[in-house]
Image (cartoon, grey):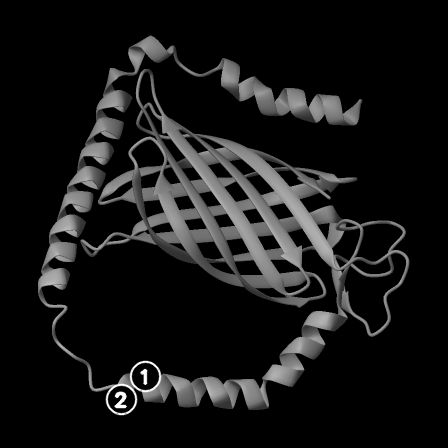
Amino acid sequence: MKLLCIILLLLLPLSMMPAQDQEAEGDEKIEEAIRRIQEDAKEEEKEEEKEEEDSGEEDDGDSCAGGQIFGEIFAEILGELFWQYVLSLRFAPYPYAEQSDFRYSTLVFESGEREKIASLQTSADLSTHFDKTYGNTNRLSAQLSALHFNLFYQTVFASTVSLSSLSLNGGLSLVIGGFDLSGFGGAYFFSNLGIAMFSMGLSSRVFLPGRFYLDLYNLYAFPNSGIPYIHLAASLNYMVWRFSVGAGYNYSNFSGVVFNGPCLKIGFWL
């Protein structure tokens, strides 16, 4: 019954949205963002053509030698400690699990029955912007010990026009008790434009007393034209068994076209 009430509270703001047939202004803003993204893609094609023309130049190899030396030092000094950390990291069945004597994660050298080496979270949020546009963001975050993977899918929409982006990323996490910090990199796609580029970012979760946790996420996509596209999200969430409900703020910037506003969020942990 409590969960049903929470879901109804989350859905209530949707009924208060203005009619979509009155959102021509929002459509125009999304079309402007699409136009700028396509211009960036054209600039990228021009830069690639220039790079192909200059590809005949040879490198002296000094920078590669420096990178190899750094890699060897890292492998020898920190490699063993890193793998020991990876093998000893364990997660609770879900955050604030009553049957667990730790919150979210711990470092152990023997696995217990109530501990696992993987953690999976999925979430969805709906945001209303201040320009007659709206946004829906879906995220899937997976931890396999210290290895981090995430999927990011966002749609910005108005009455008749929408802009969708998808990002797949992988990286490493520093996980200490009720805190984790992940750095990652991967690929970023505009699914309805057929444009792809490199992405990277950081995410963090801080598990607070009283079944609250703070979720922070930022993602940068890098067109060759120079200025990166930016996604920032922050939310304060409350746990109800494996479910979470929360509120926060989303910000997206596509070549100077900004979509930002408050959001409502729901999540589930596996």
Rendering coords of residue 121 (x, y %)? 65, 45
In the figure, 171 relative to 17: above or below? below
Side of 233 where 115 appears, left or right: right
Task: Residue type at mark 1: give it.
Answer: Cys
Q: Residue at x 48, y 43 (%)?
A: 152
For the residues bearing labels 1 and 2, Cβ distance under 8 angstroms: yes
Classify mark 2: helix, strand or loop: helix
Residue 64 marker: 1
Mark 1 neighbour density, 10 Å: few (under 14) some (14–19) many (20 or more): few
Name the quadrant containing residue 178.
bottom right
Mark 2 neighbour density, 10 Å: few (under 14) some (14–19) many (20 or more): few
Q: Residue at x 16, y 79 (%)?
A: 58
Q: Residue at x 48, y 15 (%)?
A: 16
> Foreground residue, 62 or 167?
62
> Foreground residue, 28 or 168?
168
Side of 225 where 168 appears, left or right: right
Query: How far is disc 1 from disc 2 in space, using C-alphas?
Result: 5 Å
Side of 225 where 82 appears, left or right: right
Classify mark 1: helix, strand or loop: helix
Residue 62 marker: 2
In the figure, 93 relative to 158: above or below? below
